[in-house]
Image (cartoon, rainbow, N blue to C red):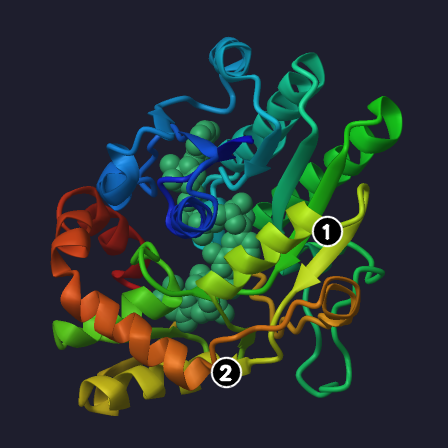
């Protein structure tokens, strides 16, 4: 079995590669990633020298390069993690989101058709459903919830999802889509809430909470997401969408307080800053379909997952120290100073 994983030098893609290489040691895995600011080759160092692993620096928008790779490898399965993934950046500069997340997806699927790939899996997000009100805890996103996006990021992901379904119906491409809630765990880029707060707290820097911090996210340990995708690849029905989430809703402010407590830092570091434009209030997944059809359930409780994650950042300073020097500093200044 030959699998192509795109975006494997990023957060979830790298965790997925580790999961798959471990579970299917005889299969070949090819990672393509253009190594944007969010992609780190050092993340993949434990698999880089394995015989059944290949890395190629390829942009999914580069049709010729993608076709050449598919010609060489003739993959059985393609799993697309490659994306611009940060909502705040999409608010500042939407166009790269449309190019990578929509155009890149269509190029990958064209390649799948041309080289007769047996399965294309699109890694999508619960953000395509928009948000839920805080005063209706009875409401959850199901696969039938209408697409109703808020940010350029979520709109680009929704555009990609619609294209994936269209390629299935129009060209018969064997596709599946997963829409997961917020992930956390090792190798999470420090622009996102949890790693940003851990690293700032370690430096006794302000912890910038957008608005009142009442917004709710449904957090899932990254390994549980990877296992769910693996299961969908094995047993999922072609043409179907599967929501992934573990009923673990938390307010942002509570997440930040948990991180302070775990690290023994004072809550006085918390600073409420200007809210994100168009900020989604609440995400919450109904995972009934993936549970009843495929038997998936999350395995890591948040209390354990957050401890493991904080320990990982404490033990792997070398990984994030380089990232937060240089370009990241400029990003941080632009995004957070005068906020
Ligand atoms: P990430 O930003 O950490 O990683 C994205 C990776 O894609 C990086 O390695 C980057 O170099 C690569 N990439 C970007 N543009 C590329 C291009 N044009 N060609 C090739 N590679 C390119 O993102 P992540 O958090 O790991 O998210 C992975 C996927 O999962 C995304 O599709 C995202 O929408 C989805 N998702 C993320 C979450 C979450 O909580 N992080 C939740 C649900 C779904
Ligand atoms: P984020 O990790 O960017 O994921 P998403 O926007 O895709 O859910 O943000 C998670 C939540 O945390 C979101 O409600 C925005 C909020 N947030 C802050 O309050 N401060 C920050 O510095 C960041 C990065 C996010």
Q: CA distance from mark 2 to mark 1?
A: 34 Å
Q: Secondary structure at mark 2?
A: strand
Residue identifier under label 2:
251
Q: Residue furthest right?
A: 169
Q: Secondary structure at mark 1?
A: helix
Is label 1's Cβ within 8 Å of ligand 1? no
Q: Quadrant of residue 170?
A: top right
Q: Give coordinates of residue 14: x percent, y percent.
A: 38, 46
On screen, 204 above or below 268? Answer: above
Which residue corresponds to the image point at 29% horizontal and 58% vertical from the top-left?
190
Residue identifier under label 1:
235
Which residue corresponds to the image point at 74% horizontal and 37% vertical from the top-left?
175
Q: Residue furthest front?
A: 26
Q: Give coordinates of residue 160: x percent, y percent.
A: 67, 37
Which of the four quarters of the rendered structure image does ligand 2 lie in?
bottom left
Seen from the viewer's position, the closer of residues 320 and 290 is 290
User: Badge 2: few (under 14), some or many (20 or more) residues near its Cα, within 10 Å?
Assistant: some
Marks 2/1 in contact by CB < 8 Å: the verdict is: no
Seen from the viewer's position, the closer of residues 201 and 268 is 201
Q: Give coordinates of residue 235: x percent, y percent.
A: 73, 51
Q: Is residue 1 left or right of residue 146?
A: left
Q: Is residue 79 left or right of residue 290?
A: left
Sequence-first tag of 2 and 1: 1
Which residue corresponds to the image point at 67% horizontal and 18% vertical from the top-left?
110
Residue 42 in view = yes
Q: Is residue 95 left or right of residue 15?
A: right
Q: Quadrant of the C terminus?
A: bottom left
Q: Quadrant of residue 255?
A: bottom left
The label nearer to you, 2 versus 1, is 1
């Amino acid at each position: 079995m030959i699998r192509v994983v795109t975006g494997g030098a990023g957060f979830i893609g790298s965790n997925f590669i580790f999961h798959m290489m471990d579970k299917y040691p005889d299969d070949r895995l090819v990672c393509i990633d253009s190594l944007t600011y969010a992609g780190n080759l050092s993340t993949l160092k434990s698999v880089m020298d394995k015989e059944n692993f290949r890395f190629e620096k390829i942009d999914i928008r580069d049709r010729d390069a993608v076709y050449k790779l598919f010609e060489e490898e003739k993959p059985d399965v393609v799993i697309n993690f490659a994306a611009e993934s940060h909502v705040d950046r999409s608010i500042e500069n939407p166009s790269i989101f449309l190019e990578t997340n929509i155009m890149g997806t269509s190029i990958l699927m064209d390649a799948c058709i041309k080289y007769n790939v047996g399965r294309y899996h699109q890694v999508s997000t619960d953000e395509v459903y928009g948000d839920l009100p805080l005063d209706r805890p009875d409401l959850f996103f199901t696969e039938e919830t209408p697409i109703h996006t808020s940010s350029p990021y979520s709109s680009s992901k929704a555009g990609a999802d619609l294209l994936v379904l269209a390629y299935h119906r129009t060209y018969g491409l064997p596709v599946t889509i997963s829409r997961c809630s917020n992930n956390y765990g090792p190798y999470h880029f420090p622009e996102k809430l949890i790693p940003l707060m851990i690293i700032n707290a370690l430096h006794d820097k302000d912890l910038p909470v957008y608005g009142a911090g009442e917004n709710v996210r449904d957090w899932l340990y990254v390994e549980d997401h990877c296992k769910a995708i693996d299961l969908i690849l094995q047993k999922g029905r072609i043409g179907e969408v599967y929501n992934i989430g573990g009923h673990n809703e938390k307010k942002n402010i509570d997440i930040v307080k948990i991180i302070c407590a775990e690290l023994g830092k004072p809550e006085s570091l918390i600073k409420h800053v200007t809210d994100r434009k168009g900020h989604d209030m609440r995400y919450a997944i109904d995972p009934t379909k993936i549970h009843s059809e495929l038997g998936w359930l999350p395995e890591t409780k948040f209390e354990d997952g957050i401890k493991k994650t904080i320990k990982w950042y404490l033990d792997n300073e070398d990984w994030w120290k380089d990232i937060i020097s240089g370009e990241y500093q400029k990003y941080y200044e632009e995004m957070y100073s005068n906020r």
